[in-house]
Amino acid sequence: MELHEYQTKSLLSRFGIPTPPYYVITSEMEIEERVKRSGLKEGVVKAQIHAGGRGKAGGVKIGKSADELIKHAREMLGKRFVTPQTGPEGLVSSTLILTPLVDVRHEYYISLVVDRRAAAVSVLASTEGGVEIEEVLKRDPRKLLRENVSESGRLHSFQIMRLLSGLQWKDEVAEQGRKIIDALTQLFLHFDMLTLEINPLVLTKQGTLLAVDAKATVDDNALYRQKEIAYLFDDSQLPKRELEAKRNDLAYVAMQGNIGCMVNGAGLAMATMDLIKFWGGSPANFLDVGGGASEEKVIKGFEIILSDPSVEAILVNIFGGIMSCEIIAKALIKAVSTASRSVPIVVRLEGTHVHEARTLLEKSKLPLYFAKDLDDAAKHIVKGR
């Protein structure tokens, strides 16, 4: 679950990490009132979307007067922003934040991530803040500092000293930085985060470190124990089909191809898409119905796939371990019989109750192609239609 900038800053403040003041705007009626309440004569209006690159897309604008701030807010609220991370469909900003300008002496980068290679949480930092960290790494990988959090849940003193030295922080600034790094680590672990990024972390001309921009991602699998923040999920940031899938506990990601995929298991889904690409096709989606999906869930997954007008064929690839192939067959019969449109369907079933499932599908007289194995299924869905 991704968090917006204002949501992340709220959590930062709870852990004692300083941020500039900000005012949240969620409706047209609030714009003028929030600007007047802030007392700002100049400031910044920021669109809140789950994607980077919003500044280049017009999602961050400076206003030199209250009237200009109001004008920017009215133009940006409800606007669809297209960035390299959103894809061509873009994302709508249903929330804005208004914040004052900051007197910047220097900008830094700091983040925490789950590093799967190291099997640890890593703290990343750089003196090159305010830009995409990927660009920094291209120019000079040595600019990125990295320390892994110990099993105690904290960095050792010598690790913090290495970070402070690498960031060239001394005296009072170093003490501020030490507290911020420690608080960020505790925040990250407390809320089961996958990423937590401050970019930039600004050193002001007054000598204060401030988290000027921030974003975070919380592990979806931990939300059952993170009810305190689970409500922060913003469903306006998901495409319609992905939102429908999420509400039905289906793992769905839209892609740019024309072959719909219904699979059980993420690894099998990836292998299925790889083979479709190998034979010259292009997947329209990633859809994992899970290991023990109900008949209703499978039907809903089929409906979601068919609701994508770019889907011209569907490959159903099920390996029944916990999942019964018979459930898939029954769901498939119901889904196809009531579908709003018809497309070619290739079915590959293996595992639990596969013979019963095949018998059901054959009796249904549905126009399906039964593949003898996964390679045959992928080849036929691409070449045989």
Image (cartoon, rainbow, N blue to C red):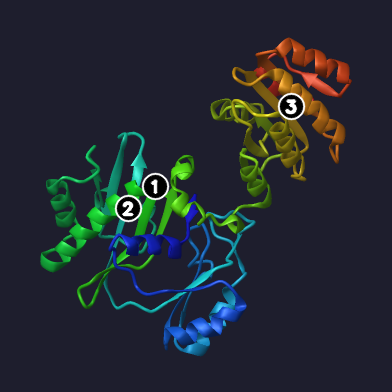
Q: Is residue 363 left or right of residue 135?
A: right
Label 3 close to label 1 by CB (< 8 Å): no
Estimate the spatial distance between the alpha carbons at disc 2 and disc 1, rounded to whole Å. Answer: 8 Å
How far across and how far down the image is residue 147, in percent? 23, 45
Q: Which residue is mark 1?
A: 193
Please say if the residues under marks 2 and 3 sit with CB atoms less than 8 Å apart. no
Secondary structure state at the residue bearing disc 2:
helix
**Left or right position of 83 against 294:** left
Label 3: few (<14), some or many (≥20) within 10 Å? Answer: many
Q: On the image, numbered disc 2 is attached to which residue? A: 187
Mark 3 sits on what residue?
381
Q: CA distance from mark 2 to mark 3?
A: 47 Å
Outermost residue toward the right?
365
Q: Residue at x 68, y 31 (%)?
A: 262
Amino acid marked by disc 3: Ile
The answer to whether the residue labelled 2 contacts the one labelled 1, judged by CB atoms less than 8 Å apart, is: yes
Please tell me whether residue 61 is drawn above or below residue 337 in the rendered image. Answer: below
